[in-house]
Amino acid sequence: MNGKHIELFLIDGSPGGLTTAEIIGWTGHVMRGERSQLDDFLRREEGSRNGAYILLGDDEAAPSGVKAYIGRTERIGDRLRQHRARKDFWDRFVVITTKDDTFTEGHWGYLEARLVELAKSADRAGLANDNSPLGRKLSEAQSSDMEAFIQQLSIVLPVLGVNVIRSRKTQQPPAPSVLASESPVFHLSDRKRGVDARAQLIDGEFTILEGSVIVGTWNGVGKADSTRRAYDNYRAQHEQLMAEGGIRADGAVTRDIRFASPSTAGAVALGRSCNGRKEWIEADGQMYGSWEARGEAREA
């Protein structure tokens, strides 16, 4: 795979400030900021451009704990002012424009529809969009250009910490020289609870694999306040996955489900707290934590 030269610029020199991201040779221009920095953004030239945008907020009940709204407009600054007055859930935003501002309304309409489509497919965020936008009709050449634009955008957004459209990559057969560094499949079982789950570290994320069986109902109850909060979060994730069809009533997992850590994945699977680094076991009996430590030792 070829490398990518991504240029990040911290506008005020602060890691938490407005940040732009570009790929060398790409026409796209992406800016990320906090809601509290919206006035700073509105004073910039990008606020008068047409383009697409993503509003983001935290929501424990949503996939990956994130809620998002995707839109496009002919004048981004005006639209974000409206959303500040009318939408409360978001606390950060991403603006997508082009350096030469040559895209038409049709281009941005196409992008908006594809971003919503990709976000639903990736299933990483709860979408606040009431309806799915209808994509604009573009020529074959223009559609090809937009798909190339989206491919680059899908690389830039995760660099800014925005994973709304990030999906599992098609796994290619590994080269013999890198086999040892790739994640094996780990197993988690509990006969009493009927759990028989498989998981793998994929693209840096701990993923319970389709076909696994986990608890159909999450019944864990914590005693301490901190434990209760953690259990409430696990239960909310489990119930959200049930509502979306990712888990059936009998506990069958219908699609790959990504988690931030093996412990969170294990807790959602078992219906109780879980030390994922000890309880996820490779076929040869090695714990996930031991495999992880072995990989860190190789990199040292």
Image (cartoon, rainbow, N blue to C red):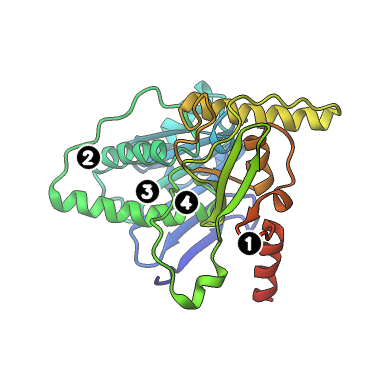
Can residue 185 be seen at all in this image of the molecule? yes
State which tag comes first along the sequence, 3 or 4: 3
State which tag comes first along the sequence, 3 or 1: 3
Please provide percent x and percent y for residue 76.
40, 37
User: Relative to 92, does residue 143 appear above or below in the rendering?
Assistant: below
- What is the number of the mark on residue 97? 3
Q: Nearer the viewer, mark 4 or mark 2?
A: 4
User: Which residue: 69% across, 76% down?
Assistant: 300
User: Which residue: 70% across, 27% down?
Assistant: 232
Few, some or many residues within 10 Å of mark 1 (<14, 14–19, 20+): few
State which tag comes first along the sequence, 2 or 1: 2
* Callout 3 secondary element: strand
* Callout 1 secondary element: loop
To which residue does mark 2 refer? 106
Q: Residue furthest front?
A: 191
Callout 3–callout 2 Cβ contact below 8 Å: no
- Numbered marks: total: 4
- Mark pair 4, 2: CA separation: 22 Å
Could you tell me the amino acid type at mark 4? Leu
- Mark pair 3, 4: CA separation: 13 Å
Few, some or many residues within 10 Å of mark 2 (<14, 14–19, 20+): some
| Apparent side of residue 50 relative to residue 53 in the rendered image (left or right) | left
Give the camera-side residue of 235 and 79: 235
- What is the number of the mark on residue 185? none
To which residue does mark 4 refer? 157
* Callout 4 secondary element: helix
To which residue does mark 1 refer? 284
What is the quadrant of the N terminus in the image?
bottom left
Could you tell me the amino acid type at mark 1? Asp
Few, some or many residues within 10 Å of mark 4 (<14, 14–19, 20+): many
> On the image, which quarter does residue 3 sit in?
bottom left
| Apparent side of residue 34 relative to residue 126 in the rendered image (left or right) | right
